[in-house]
Image (cartoon, coloured by chain):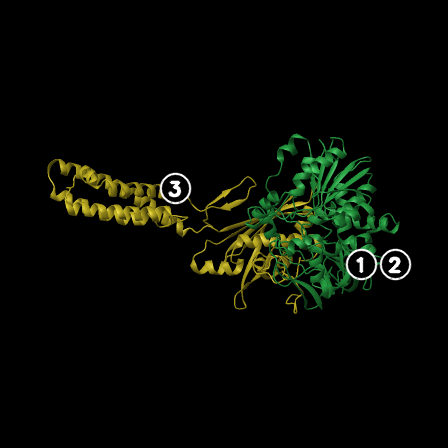
């Protein structure tokens, strides 16, 4: 089969690789009908996630049709079912899964020891996301093996098109969880750093959870335009205005009640010097992540407010404004999305027409063109916001 | 089985090497460094204090001794463990005693008295060096590592965990070094472990203590080529959040030959092995299967993590 493979930093190739097979009783093999490129894939491309190997198949947002099942399949999954697959691989049986914390499943990372060395304890395995997180082949391919399919694969029974349900695999639940972690109460003002797909869905979710105003911060006018026109947000272009001043102004000095970092480890800063400071430390591995958005979110947040960090971080950050955080009674919540927990309720909202996630798609292309898709997505060319790949 | 151990606050015995000789060895190292530097920097004053002449041969001997002392210091201070380093000091002491004894015979009066004192001091130092060296040697023979232990929390009741473990034929499902465990009686079983070149090491084991839902203790019966024993305890985790499983293994103090056999039977590193075993035990008892990915198709093991395959489907699968 064909698959999009990581061949080194900034090097991708669509290669011919063997078809996946069932390895374990609860596995399914899914014939992919649609997959997507995620912002967090860019961290892999840029070489900021350790433990990648030449030849790794990428992709953790995908859906398709079950073509093979292991002998231990549970929950009535059948060959021929149309499914969306959650990006964290979760067993459903460990204590974390049973508490609904699927992205920290205790059993799904066979390489737990490496992750424990880096992080203290291991999170769940993830499709196509380094050997630190399991060494699983991803879904930017024609077929993919799905472990614990009874937990990770959600059956889509009505005729909703792929474009409507594909993002249940990651970015929609991720955006939803970002808003939910903020503990939004009706009337809240929410500020969101990053107008990528997660920021867009966090905006939609914040409104659904009762936010009165959502302010989205980015530097690409076309992305801010989508946040404004499609998600109903106010916007700040941080290359044009000072974010802290503007937020203070917009909230008459209070600051937003909830601040969401939907940027993560590869943030940018309008001050070339500050950006260069963190970029240089990152290059010499003195810090691994550039936390511009997180720092700003902390300083911006109202006293006693909540920061929700949903953008991906991999390692260590510097200059965490702990003084501001501690003295102003702030709360920080974080986590990879527990997708399995949100898929069903969000599918329900899609079905009812409360959310139409397809508005983020700007490009649809063949799997063979995946390297080109990565290129325009990474470099924000051709007003690219989300690329969907069709095998 | 003759391995030194301490019992920690969880009641688990852990192997300890006797590190008692390390401290004195380091101290001797610093002592050597002091002596060496003094002998090189203030040779003539040292010579006078010891009662040897300021003659050219005496100075040469003293300088050589100074250089040698610095050598001892390097041997004792630079490596992570001083090991047999103290013996180099004993050898130096013998040389010093010979040289000083010779000088003593040829001197008279006050210088002879001072040399006598120097001889006595050297004798004392030699005794200390000898003591530290002998302890270090004994220590090396008693190789640490006769114990391995590990723990894991599983989302199962103590009853379930106990029952799974008590059926010893389940063990090879998560203990990769075992080929098979066959029950041969209510408390007896025959264990076969993989050894290189397709060979197997086999032994007979018996359960010597069992407390339902709490503890199983087993050991190899007399005559096993790799005498070993183990205990597994099951305790309810705080707040009823599953069961804490703690395993201890003890195996024969490795001599050379038996040591190799143990390595074959228990893997290169029993401590590492037990951690892998417990992770797989958790996977099997909670999910019913061993976690496998394309990069780690054989399932969790520290060794396979070091040599990952790319995360892409394999052309052929070795596993069942």
Indicate the chain coloured green by its letter.
A
Query: Residue A159 has which mark?
Result: 2
Determine whether the residue tagged by mark 1 lies in a helix, strand or loop.
Answer: strand
Depth check: B43 or A307 in front? A307
The quarter in which the N terminus of chain A is drawn is bottom right
The furthest residue to the front: A240
Q: Nearer the viewer, mark 1 or mark 2?
A: 2
Indicate the chain coloured yellow by its letter.
B
How packed is label 2: few (under 14 Cα within 10 Å), some, or many (20 or more)?
few
Depth check: A304 or A378 in front? A378
- Would residue A230 be visible to someone looking at this image? no
Classify residue B140 as left or right of residue A100: left
Tell which subunit mark 1 falls on.
Answer: A
Label 3, on which residue? B23
N-terminal of the pair, mark 1 or mark 2, is: 1
Evaluate if marks 1 and 2 touch, with contact meaning CB atoms under 8 Å apart.
Answer: no
- Would residue B306 be visible to someone looking at this image? yes
Classify residue A247 as left or right of residue B92: right
Label 1, on which residue? A83
How packed is label 3: few (under 14 Cα within 10 Å), some, or many (20 or more)?
few
Task: Provide residue B187's location: percent of width, then percent of height.
Answer: 61, 55
Depth check: A311 or A46 in front? A46
Q: Are marks 1 and 2 on the same chain?
A: yes
Identify the residue at image location x=82%, y=52%.
A359
Task: Provide residue A338's location: percent of width, then percent of height.
Answer: 74, 48
Distance of label 1 from label 2 (alpha carbons) = 12 Å
Tell which subunit mark 2 falls on.
Answer: A
């Amino acid at each position: 089969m064909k698959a999009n493979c990581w061949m080194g930093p900034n090097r991708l190739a669509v290669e011919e690789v063997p078809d996946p097979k069932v390895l374990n009783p609860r596995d399914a093999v899914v014939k992919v009908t649609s997959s997507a490129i995620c912002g967090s894939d860019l961290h892999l491309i840029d070489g900021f996630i350790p433990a990648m190997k030449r030849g790794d198949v990428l992709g953790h947002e995908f859906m398709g049709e079950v073509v093979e099942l292991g002998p231990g399949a549970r929950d009535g999954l059948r060959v021929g079912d149309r499914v969306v697959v959650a990006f964290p691989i979760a067993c459903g049986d460990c204590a974390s899964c049973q508490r609904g914390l699927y992205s920290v499943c205790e059993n799904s990372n066979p390489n737990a020891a490496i992750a424990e060395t880096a992080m203290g304890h291991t999170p769940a395995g993830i499709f196509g996301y380094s050997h630190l997180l399991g060494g699983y082949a991803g879904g930017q391919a024609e077929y993919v093996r799905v472990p614990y399919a009874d937990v990770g694969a959600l059956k889509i029974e009505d005729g909703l098109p792929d474009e409507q349900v594909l993002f249940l695999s990651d970015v929609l639940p991720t955006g939803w969880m970002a808003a939910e972690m903020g503990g939004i109460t009706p009337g809240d003002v929410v500020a969101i750093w990053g107008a990528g797909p997660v920021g867009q869905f966090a905006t939609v979710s914040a409104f659904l959870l009762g936010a009165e105003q959502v302010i989205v911060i980015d530097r690409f006018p076309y992305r801010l335009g989508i946040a404004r026109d499609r998600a109903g947000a106010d916007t700040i272009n941080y290359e044009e205005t000072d974010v802290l001043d503007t937020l203070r102004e917009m909230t008459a000095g209070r600051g937003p009640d909830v601040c969401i970092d939907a940027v993560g480890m590869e943030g940018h800063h309008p001050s070339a010097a500050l950006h260069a400071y963190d970029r240089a430390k990152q290059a010499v591995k003195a810090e691994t992540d550039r936390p511009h958005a997180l720092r700003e979110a902390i300083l911006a947040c109202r006293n006693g407010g909540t920061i929700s960090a949903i953008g991906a971080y991999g390692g260590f950050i510097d200059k965490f404004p702990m003084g501001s955080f501690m003295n102003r009674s702030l709360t920080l919540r974080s986590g990879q999305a527990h997708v399995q927990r949100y898929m069903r309720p969000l599918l329900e909202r899609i079905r009812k027409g409360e959310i139409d996630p397809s508005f983020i798609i700007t490009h649809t292309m063949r799997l063979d063109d995946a390297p080109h898709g990565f290129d325009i997505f990474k470099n924000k060319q051709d007003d690219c916001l989300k690329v969907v790949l069709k095998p | 089985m003759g391995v030194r151990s301490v019992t920690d606050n969880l009641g688990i015995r852990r192997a300890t090497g006797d590190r008692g000789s390390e401290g004195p060895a380091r101290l001797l190292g610093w002592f050597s460094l002091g002596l060496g530097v003094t002998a090189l920097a203030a040779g003539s004053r040292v010579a006078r204090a010891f009662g040897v002449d300021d003659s050219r041969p005496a100075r040469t001997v003293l300088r050589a001794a100074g250089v040698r002392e610095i050598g001892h210091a390097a041997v004792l201070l630079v490596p992570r463990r001083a090991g047999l380093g103290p013996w180099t000091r004993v050898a130096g002491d013998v040389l010093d005693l010979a040289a000083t004894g010779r000088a003593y015979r040829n001197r008279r009066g006050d210088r002879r008295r001072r040399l006598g004192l120097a001889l006595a001091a050297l004798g004392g130092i030699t005794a200390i060096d000898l003591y530290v060296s002998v302890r270090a040697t004994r220590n090396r023979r008693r190789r640490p590592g006769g114990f391995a232990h590990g723990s894991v929390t599983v989302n199962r009741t103590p009853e379930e965990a106990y029952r799974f473990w008590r059926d010893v034929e389940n063990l090879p499902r998560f203990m990769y070094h075992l080929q098979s465990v066959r029950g041969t009686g209510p408390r007896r079983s025959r264990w076969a472990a993989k050894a290189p070149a397709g060979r197997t090491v086999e032994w007979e084991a018996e359960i010597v203590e069992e407390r339902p839902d709490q503890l199983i203790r087993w050991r190899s019966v007399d005559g096993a080529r790799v005498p070993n024993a183990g205990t597994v305890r099951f305790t309810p985790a705080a707040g009823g959040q599953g069961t804490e499983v703690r395993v201890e293994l003890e195996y024969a103090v490795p001599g050379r030959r038996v040591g190799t056999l143990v390595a074959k039977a228990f893997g290169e590193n029993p401590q590492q092995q037990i951690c892998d075993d417990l992770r797989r035990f958790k996977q099997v008892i909670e999910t019913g299967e061993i976690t496998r990915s394309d990069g780690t198709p054989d399932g969790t093991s520290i060794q396979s993590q070091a040599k990952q395959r790319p995360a892409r489907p394999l052309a052929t699968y070795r596993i069942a």
